[in-house]
Image (tube, grey):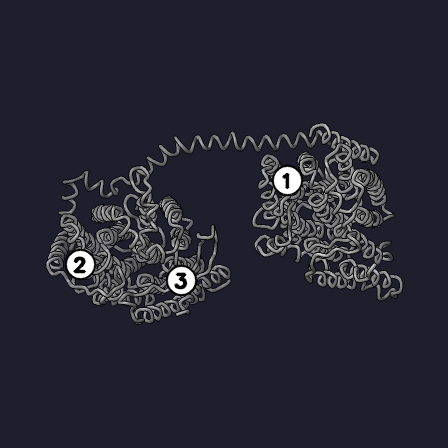
Amino acid sequence: MGYANFLYMKEELSLVAVIVILLLYDIFGSQKSLRYFQPVACVLLLVHTLVNLLPSGEAVAFGGMYHNTPIGNIVKSILSFGTLLVFMQAGNWLQSEKIIIRRGEFYVVTLSTLLGMYFMISAGHFLMYFIGIELASIPTATLVAYDKYRNKSAEAAAKYILSAVFASGLSLYGLSLIYGTTGSLYFTDVPAKLDGSPIQLMAFAFFFVGLGFKLSLVPFHQWTPDTYEGAPTSVTAYLSVISKGSAAFVLMALLFKVFAPLVKEWQAILYGIIILTITLANIFAIRQQNIKRFFAYSSISQAGYIMLGVIGGNALGMTGLVYYVLVYMLSNLAAFGVISIVEHRSGKVTIDDYNGLYATNPRLSVVMMLALFSLAGIPPFAGFFSKFFIFAAAAEQGFYVLVFIALLNTIISLYYYLRIVKAMFINKSDAPIAGFTSDAYTRVSLLVCSLGILLLGIASCVYENIGRFSFGM
Amino acid sequence: MEYSVLILLLPFLSFIALGLLGTKLKPVVAGSIGTAVLGICALLAYATAATYFSMPRMDGVREAITLFTVEWLRFTDTLSIELGILLDPISVMMLVVITTVSLMVHIYSLGYMHGERGFQRYYSFLSLFTFSMLGLVVATNIFQMYIFWELVGVSSYLLIGFYYTKPEAVAASKKAFIVTRFADLGFLIGILILSYYTNTFSFDVLNAGDASLFSKAAGTTFMGCSVMSWAMALIFMGGAGKSAMFPLHIWLPDAMEGPTPVSALIHAATMVVAGVYLVARLFPVYSMETPEVLVLIAVVGAFTALYAAVVACVQTDIKRVLAFSTISQIGFMMVSLGVSGMGGHEGLGYMASMFHLFTHAMFKALLFLCAGAIIHAVHSNEMSHMGGLRKYMPVTHVTFLIACLAIAGIPPFSGFFSKDEILAATFEFSPVLGVVMSFIAGLTAFYMFRLYYNIFWGEESRHEHTPHEAPKSMTMPLVFLAAVTVVAGFIPFGHFVSSDGTAYTIHLNWAVAGASVVVAVVAIAIATALYRKKSPVPDRMAAAMPGLHHAAFRRFYMDELYLFITKRIIFNCVSRPIAWFDRHVIDGFFNGLAYLSQRASYAVRVIQSGQVQQYAYVILLGTVVIAALVLWLL
């Protein structure tokens, strides 16, 4: 084994370095110096993100276990950037009582899950992929349970870990069948042996559960609302965006590269799942009162839209998906940034609590409105363009009915997204949330998100640059 | 000449600045900024003109210079929209006209609009209009022209409706916008047809005289005419809308609801001649590919000129008289283009049209600004409230008289020269048309002097307070424009602008000139006899022909006809069914969707039980169902 192989893994290695530094800092830093944990973590992650923006070519290491692609690097950069935004928003919550003594762990554990996602993205072997997905899943449970003295948090974690374990088990079962029928777990070897025999189809269906669970596609979605509601808000934001984005990309890469011979079958599966996911999630979202539960259903339905980019199997879809993940990340983090700070300052989490927010906190309301408009896909915000590209990719492959159903659902989603806008801007309240000033980190992160929502759609270079590295089947 | 870009840029910046800062600025400051910017623009335009016209000709032809161009929107490899600045004789001339009149209007408005609510808004709109109009004339391609064409329409809409609390102004602005928009629909379709067949928007390419470019369009016929003719006729429709040609003229008289300086700028000197400019811009195409459309243009122009002149004779609102006079004069320009050929003496009509555009812009702006001063003094638009004003407003009186003499075609004022060239070109094309146009010229002299005597002579009506001369800021532009009107006729215009870019020396056609002067003098004499002192003759003449007089006063019922067509026919037969479809089918569909979602969201509550065992069952069940479906259905 040549140690030179490690040089190809610069993203993973630099992330491991960040984790180790933070871990040592957490253990050996004095109580006084630990006050600076948030800035230190943010700066380190920023450096990591910037370093990895340097272009790196395609590389295969460790005998094909590790496979690095340019588009994968773009996704990694997007994910680490999103994590940075989450870190900036998490500071408030980590300052609170009972949490403050464990604040360092939050950063370390979160970055560990990010490392798992990196491995998922760059895997060249199913074993590597499985290690990656588990590394991304198990620490997440500890994050969800971070407020362990709060029953809801503990319950959310229990539901998450049980569902995750169950889904992993099914997925692993599928993998074992794949190994049994093809004799290999290398991504490069498996496609040639896939002939669509019944046992392989069944294997694929079981394998699919693992990523379906991470993406919270219907019918693997039921843990989502409970977990999102119970988890600390920053963790919910992380789950809804980073975890989901990585799973979406990995699913697409696997379907394109490994399961290409089964394209007819997986397109049929996705077809049904997309319709179910978007529609059911929308119908549930209409009635939610708790804003975090509401965003859980919103994120389920957004995952359904993301799958529209996968189903076509073309390069346009891959570009659309990565772009969608980026835009969705900014929009959702803008929304969660507002939810997080509002919850921290006032303890309020239902939609009715947001009545009259514009009168007391106009700037936060405008950020929230931008986020919601972008999620609903209203031009000229970035969300419109991301939806447009995804729809175009699916329509190009002739999935007109599917696109039409998705469009109808957009209309429904418009209703429930605007409900919150109406609450903030139009509804009157006897006891509105009092006006407050946010901390600098939250402000910067919200500013970045808002600028992204406003400018990403107009700056065509972003989409074009992603498009340069995309590939289809 | 790169600085010419600034001519376009400065008004735009001024619009943004005044629009954004708005009421934070003091009115005086806002007005001064707008005026100063326009002053700079005018100087730059003069410099551009001086540089451009002093450049040596290439093979005896004035070259068109594309100052810069950027690709803006790419449709196909061969078809893209560019934005740029094109300088050629007519665009440079228009730069001078627009900046000059606009500057005068800016200065004038400092006095006229003093103390009005929304003074800053007024100046920002004026800047927007100036920017759009300048962009229109320097367009390098027909699509860029269309963009600015619409911007001009919008700014005209905003300025007509400036007094938005007045219902008439709101109605007038809507009317102007809708009528011109309707015409622009034809324009757009024409552009699309033309570009579809020729694969270009660029004026350079279209006007290069390459007949093979149009062979595909000329070879295809649609409803008996070649597609080429359709395209060019539709493009002319856009021009007819903006230039208020019959039957699309109905918006212009109503547009007089806007502030009077706006009427002078937009509805007399610049925007309304955009249609003439458009035809001139594409003149080589019209002349060589579709001469039949040119004939159409000549006929429409002549009829409009006659119609508007007749109506102008009986109007009593002084701004309306001027509005119809404008329509009539633009008709002259259109006729002149319609009868023109390409090159040398053939191109006399083209040159005359542009010349008249230039002189008319000056003296018509002057007339409107005078009218503004008069209205400012007596607070009414009605002739009956005026009379005998020459004693109170000497400067206005003299400048108004100069403008009247110019438009009537009395030498040595500028209108005489340009109108004479038009008549000469018309006579060469067809003596019948020439006689008709001479008659209209006579009518023009008649109604202008009717207006003049009614305002400045005749019986003094009782005023609530004594009318007074306008302030300096208002009289200065009057004097300047009057001076231009006096000398502009002596410009050797043919050396600057001609159909093919070669130098053309104007020779007065003494027979035509003599006849037209005689006609004008006779017409003025009649007007003097009838209106200089209060006389019963006009009333008796009106009473003798009640039908004609009333019809002319009601503008030959054109507005009623439009109302009948839109309200009775289009609203009932087209709009109502569509509205029904919209309300019941489209809205019904979405209401149904909303109802269904609501019901469904009630029904599905039970699925989410909160029990993690059930979640696991659902996952397992889902997996099995998926596997089963894939196995058995595919």
The residue closer to the viewer here, A410 or B204, is: B204
Mark 2 to mark 1 CA distance (whole Å) = 69 Å
Res. B461 in view: no
Mark 1 to mark 3 CA distance (whole Å) = 46 Å
In the rendered image, residue A91, in percent from the top left (x then y), is placed at 77, 57
How packed mark 2 is, by other alpha carbons closer than 10 Å (few <14, some 14-19, many 20 or more), is many
The residue closer to the viewer here, A1 or B434, is: A1
- Secondary structure beneath dot 1 equals helix
| Amino acid on which disc 1 is placed | Ser
Q: Which mark is residue B249?
A: none
In the rendered image, residue B472, in percent from the top left (x then y), is placed at 32, 68
| Amino acid on which disc 2 is placed | Asp
Of marks 2 and 3, the one in the foreground: 3
Of marks 1 and 3, the one in the foreground: 3
Q: Residue at x 11, y 56 (%)?
A: B515
Q: Quadrant of the C terminus of chain B?
A: top right
- Secondary structure beneath dot 3 equals strand
In the rendered image, residue A446, in percent from the top left (x then y), is placed at 68, 56
Q: Which mark is residue B420?
A: 2
- Secondary structure beneath dot 2 equals helix
Q: Chain of mark 2?
A: B
Q: In the figure, B263 relative to A400: above or below?
A: below
- Which residue is disc 3 drawn over? B85
A44 to the left or right of A27: left
The residue closer to the viewer here, A273 or B574, is: A273
